[in-house]
Structure formats: C-alpha cells, structure tokens
Image (cartoon, rainbow, N blue to C red):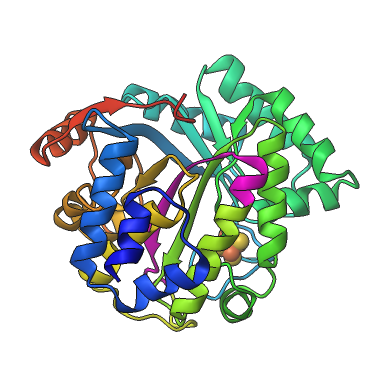
Amino acid sequence: MNSLLNKAIAQERLTPAEGLEILKNAPWTDVVEAADTVRKAKLPGNRVGYTAFRIVNYTNVCEVTCSFCSFCRSAHSPEAYVLSLDEIRQKTLEAKAKGADQIFLQGGVNKEIPLSYYTDVLKMLTQELGVKVRGFSPVELVRIAEFNGITLDELLDIFKDAGLSSVPGAGAEILSDRMRQILSPKKLPAQQWCDTLAACHKKGLPGSANIVIGSAETAEEVIEHLEYVRKTQDIAGGFKSFVVWTFQPQTDKFPIRHVRGDEYLKLLALSRLYLDNVPHIEVSLLGMGLSLGELGLHAGADDINSIVIEENVLQNHGLTTIEQAEAFIKNAGFTPYRRSLNFD
Ligand code: SF4
C-alpha cells in the first residue's frame, strides 16, 4: 500500500486498479497524509480560496424528475414558477449588496422557456449588473439546444455571446450508468455528460466537477467516476476544481446512507491524488459541516467554495459572510484569498 501512496506522492499517475486498491484498503489517515503532501507540493503558499456567489434557480419546472430531487415541479403544478427578469435582477442586487460578484444560474429542464429568456437574463446580469455568470447543467444545455433545433455548439456560442462565463459540472452525481438508472434515468448517460462539458471547455466555458456519494454506489463506481473526470480533463482541460458532495435526504425515493467523516475525508484525499490534472479540490462545508470541512483542508482540499447567500439551504452548515469565510480559513491554519469564478 505504501508503494501506491508513495507513487501518488511522487505525482505519478495512479491507474484505476491502484485507485481502487487505495479506496478499498488503505488506512484513511495514510491517504489524507499523502494528499496533504501532494497539495503542499503542487500549491505552495498555504493559501485557501473562497468565493461569493448566489444561486438563482430561475425555474423549478423540470421534466427530468430525478429521484433525489425535491425541488422540481411539473409545468401544471400550482407551485411551478419561472422567475421574471425583475425577480432575478432583485435577487442579484441583494447578493451584490452582500458582497457577491457571481451568479450561479440553475434551473429545471423547462421546454416552455424561449431561448430569448436565457439570453435576456444573461445580458441583464452581465451587461447591466456587471456580475459573472456560471450556469446550466449539461442536461439543461443539451435539452435547450434540442428544444430550439440547434446544435450544442451553436447554443454555447449564443450563451457565450450573451455573457456566460462558466458551466458547472452539475448533475454528475455518480458517473456510472447503473447508478444513473437508479437515480436519474432521464439525465444524460455518463459519457454524454463528459462530452457535453468537454464541448463547453473547448468553447472557453470552464467550470468544475463533482461527485455525490452516499447512495448505492460501489467503490468500483466511485473510481469509474474519477476516471471519467480525469479522461475528460485530459481531452478538454476545463475542470478548474473538483468537489466531493454527499446526498441529502430531500426525498424518500432513492437509496441513501450515512457518509462517515472518515469515508468523506478519504475520498476527498483520493481525489487530490487521483485527479492529477485538476488543479483545485474543494471541500463541501454545506454537506459535511465546519469541523469536518476544516479537516478537509488538511486532506488535500485548498478551497471552501462559496459563502452562502441563499434564503433556502438544506443545512445551514455554511458560512454566510466574507468575514466568516476568512476567519474560518485563518483558524484552520491557512491564508485566505478571494478567488474569481474560474480561478483566473
Ligand atoms: S435535473 Fe435538476 S431540477 Fe431536474 S429533477 Fe434532476 S436535480 Fe431536479
């Protein structure tokens, strides 16, 4: 086992079989120590990044109906909504007043929304309000292109011209087609998720990638996921960061299990070792809480993602002000820096 971890510390690429061996059999503390060593070698300076954005869920109408999602509604539901431009403007102004300079646009897959809505929103956010915009999951992009009879590349050109800066790696969950059948059979298959993001990256729309654990995934599927991300990064190079999330009990329609702190930290650390081509690893404070998040910064992570500027969060384990984010990072033993959307 030590030879595998020493190989990773020497920054030699791990094979999928070696990654699986570490995940299954290495003591989690050894993996954490190796990841901390690699993070310090690759990112000298003891710095930890944070950012400030607000998520704007522009519609809750979604035809994809993932089993774990409590947010989506059918188009005929009395709770269905599409935010107006004025509502999005108001939310953005509130976020700017709290120090945010980025908006994260996320919606359901809603075929009733015209293409002009998206471009109007993007132009309003970037040209009128001067914020950077990350937005749209791969399945949203693919379906919006289909609804409008254009190619994905044409859609990306239109959105980029309207102001889009970045596309998040949302909707990955577990990149294994067996798990996608269990969790979200109408979402994109794993390879199409990767191909869609590679197309975004090649257009100059970089973003992040993530994994969500705590369902019925196997260790083999976790490594399969990391391998999909690493291969896509080799091709297009636009994943600026990788984050490990955990499923939250939003519905009772999918298998969910408790993720122990040692399991979380081990996978976070393995992500640093395995994803040798992804520069930044983010720890999820919202999912795992501040104490474990602090340990995550000593387990290969170098970023805490964003402070929370939301009215609705699943668990209020996050940090809500820039002052809190900086104090948290300093207390963990690091130097905070506020990063841009794309880690420029
Ligand atoms: S695609 Fe997104 S909004 Fe739609 S059901 Fe799945 S998680 Fe919910």
Farthest residue toward the right?
149
Residue 155 shows in the view: yes
Residue 75 shows in the view: no
Figure quadrant of residue 3: bottom left
Ligand 1 image-quadrant field: bottom right
The percent coordinates of residue 112 (x first, y second) are 77, 51
Residue at 44% over, 29% down: 343
Q: Magenta stretch: give its range.
A: 232-250
Residue at 65% over, 23% down: 123
Residue at 24% over, 39% down: 320
From the viewer's perspective, tell me whether residue 283 is left or right of residue 183: left
The percent coordinates of residue 285 (x first, y second) are 27, 52
From the viewer's perspective, tell me whether residue 251 is left or right of residue 334: right
- Please tell me which residue lies in front, 1 or 195: 1
Residue 247 among magenta residues: yes
- Please tell me which residue lies in front, 165 or 36: 36
Residue 74 among magenta residues: no
Image quarter where the N terminus lies is bottom left
Residue 178 drawn above or below residue 53? below
